[in-house]
Amino acid sequence: MDLATPSEKLCLFLGGDVMLGRGIDQILPFPVKPRIHEEYLHSALDYLRLAEQRNGPLSYPVDFSYVWGDALAELEKRSPQARLINLETSITTSEDWEDKGINYRLSPRNAAVLKALKVDVCALANNHILDWGERGLIESLETLRSLGIRSAGAGLNLSEAAAPAVLEVRGGRLLVFAMAAPSSGVPLAWAAGPQKPGVHLLEDLSLKTLTRVQRLITSWRRPGDRVVVSIHWGGNWGYPLPKEHPFFARKLVTEAGVDLIHGHSSHHLLGLEVHQGKLIIYGCGDFLNDYEGIRGYEAYRADLPVMFFPNLDLRNGTLTDLVLVPMQIKKFRLQRAGAEDRLWLQNLLAREDRGARLGPRTPWTIES
């Protein structure tokens, strides 16, 4: 039974992977050079053309609010105290591209698109933030800082990469730690060092690593703080969870006192769990991508992002309720999902709750 009053609740918005490069950067006012270094496509404009083949002509350039579409009204309606996404795009004009197959970058002059969403924190511990080298990472950090957007999970050294983003919220502070597991495809060479820029990369998901993360959180936490861990882990496609994920997530809750796990990397939604009252999202799915014309994985419905609105009890961090708002990506823009798509997502979550056997059913509500 929820006994917390509205003034005792912390409302958050959580979005999954946000990929603003390639086709999406090209429709914004100030795109970078379109050349990309992929095996089959060599121009970011090819992704725009694929999307147009699927859903019709797209008039561009668009303004900075265009891509967020109906999500903006939903955010205005719910007024979350903090907005968190995983930014899986380097913000740079660097040409120091990594030979890794796919490289995402957003023009720094187009970074105002993040201000249009009123993002508070960008998690950066992922497998694309150094797509354009250390120079690209440094420019990304500088650009976010100039926009007044906090980041976590990457920095000029390990201390900076491991440090949380700190937000003042009702009742105290919100600490957002960001980290990545090697299973998400982050190259080991990207790990931040004492004097080396990079990401906060975990060695593995063992008890030894858990102890290190627990000490890190303890060193920052004050009485009354609420703690979110944003973690990039696992592959892009498929529903089965590696056994290490529930183990590590639950230990973060019980041993490190984490209030919410914001998991991502999969391009589609994965299962949810409430463990000892704390929300664990194993995979948020993509929040925005340029995959409209890509074929081969349609069954996973990467075109159906979900907006997560958890309410936490400020007194102890437990989840009081969770609202999921389904969207659909069409013409590189978020629009409200239809009734049939909402039902598809509802059935998916019901199946994953049962199939994963991860504990009590998550008290979620899907809203239109």
Image (spheres, rainbow, N blue to C red):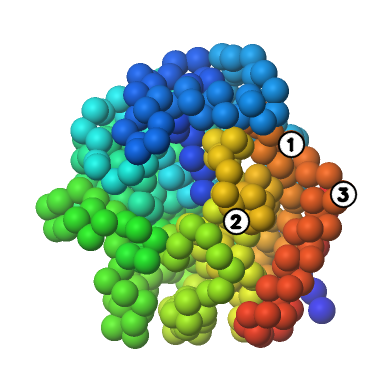
User: In percent of the image, x 39 and y 61: which residue is there?
Assistant: 184
Give yes or no for contact between labels 2 and 3 (Cβ–Cβ under 8 Å).
Answer: no
Secondary structure of the residue carrying tag 1 is strand
Marks 1/3: CA–CA distance:
13 Å
Tell me which amino acid carries mark 2.
His
Tell me which amino acid carries mark 3.
Ala
Can residue 159 be seen in the rendering of this structure? Answer: no
Marks 2/1: CA–CA distance:
17 Å
Q: Is residue 7 left or right of residue 140?
A: right
Name the spot of residue 223 as percent of width and height, x first: 48, 71
Location of mark 2 (residue) = 268
Which of the pair 279/46 is nearer the observer?
46
Q: Is residue 366 left or right of residue 157?
A: right
For residue 339, the mark is: 3
Which of the pair 193/183 is nearer the observer?
183
Marks 2/3: CA–CA distance:
18 Å
Q: Quadrant of residue 192?
A: bottom left
Secondary structure of the residue carrying tag 2 is loop
User: In percent of the image, x 24 and y 28: which residue is there?
Assistant: 95
* Above-or-below relation of 114 to 347: above
